[in-house]
Amino acid sequence: MSEPRCPVLSPSPRTWSVAYHGPRANWKGFLRLSLVTCPVALYPATSESEKISFNQLNRQTGHRIKYLKVDADTGDEVPNEDIEGHELEKGQYIEVSKEELEEIALESTRTIEIDEFVARSDIDPRYLIRPYYIRPDGKVGHDAFAVIRETIREMDTVAIGRVVLTNREHIIALEPMDKGLVGTLLRYPYEVRSEQEYFDEIQDVKVTKDMLDLAKHIVNQKGGSFEPEKFEDYYESALIELINQKRAGKAITPKDRPKGENVVDLMDALRKSVGGAAAKTEAPKKPAKKTKKAAAAQKEMLMPIAGKKPAKEAAAKKPASGARRKSA
């Protein structure tokens, strides 16, 4: 009897047997501009679920390691409780219950109140956390939503409000995108470290005009527009290749690491860079395209989506693996 096979991973296309039931909102409530109010829902605009993730395994048994909540002093396992504690001093805690947390619930748990409008350039990039898509919730309120959205668009500003997510109040910056809004969570000032403690020791260096001219020339040669689809996650691709090689029982050979070179003559390095950038601009290398036959063969080896298993694998159980995909 042949051993059960693990699915061959492929960086493209992303094909996995994951049940999808449409986007789920992280928050539902109301968006309000003065007396104009409409029900809205927030959805994550980004996802990490497509990345390869790992479980920790017991090296001796190959079983997955399970984490338990235990009493720090007695070692006894403790069930999930709704009581949380804030440590005042070492070993001294103030207990806070779920009911007490609900008592101090802010209005922003249910409503995003727009407090002010600012220029996009006024927002320091260090304050940006993560984006969310915002759309009307349900069939009502689309008119009010459109009024708020188009007002922000026409004024060419960013609306600033507050919202509570995961029991924490966040500042949120709202901007129009197509027919909806993008809300970006912002950090509070106490969460942003001062740059002085990192930059104070940087030496003051006089950069000559010749150096700047050469550097600008390199920048102009490498100029382009931001197209996210042309970027590839090389580390993710390397992970997939590693897992597939191990699954096939192939030996893993370490690759040579690039060595950094110490630049002695900065002007000479800039001149050589100008020549190198020009050569790359004139003759860009295009990645080799897969043939239709190769793509079809690779697709055959992927995990089937609709629960259909190949005849040879129908009776085989999927083995435990240290690497898995997160569901969306």
Image (tube, grey):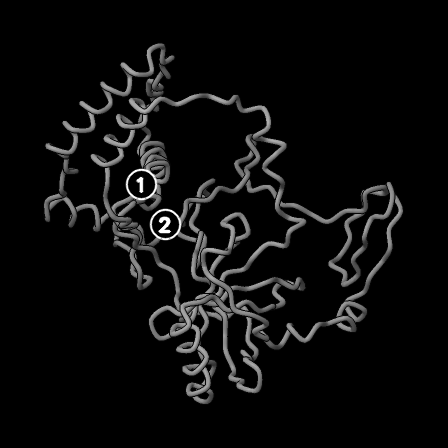
Residue 172 in the image: above or below residue 234: below
Q: What residue type is labelled 1?
A: Ser
* Tag shown at residue 136: none
Query: To which quarter of the image does residue 179 belong?
Result: bottom left
Residue 161 shows in the view: yes
Residue 249 in the image: above or below residue 268: below
Callout 2 secondary element:
loop
Sequence-first tag of 1 and 2: 1
The residue carrying mark 2 is 316
Residue drawn at point x = 47 percent, y = 64 percent: 132
Q: In this view, does 104 lie to the left or right of 172?
A: right
Residue 188 in the image: above or below residue 277: below
CB within 8 Å, label 1 to label 2: yes
Report the residue that reaches farthest toward the top.
264
Q: Nearer the viewer, residue 139 or 301?
A: 139
Q: In this view, does 237 lie to the left or right of 166?
A: left
Residue drawn at point x = 60 percent, y = 68 percent: 163
Query: To which quarter of the image does residue 112 belong?
Result: bottom right
CA gap between label 1 and label 2 equals 9 Å
Q: Which of 151 and 285 is in front in this view?
A: 151
- Residue 127, horizontal then vertical, whole percent: 55, 52
- Residue 117, horizontal then vertical, whole percent: 52, 69
- Residue 280, horizontal then vertical, whole percent: 16, 30
* Tag shown at residue 2: 1
Quick one: label 1, few (<14), some, or many (20+) residues within 10 Å? Answer: few
Report the residue that reaches farthest toward the front.
209
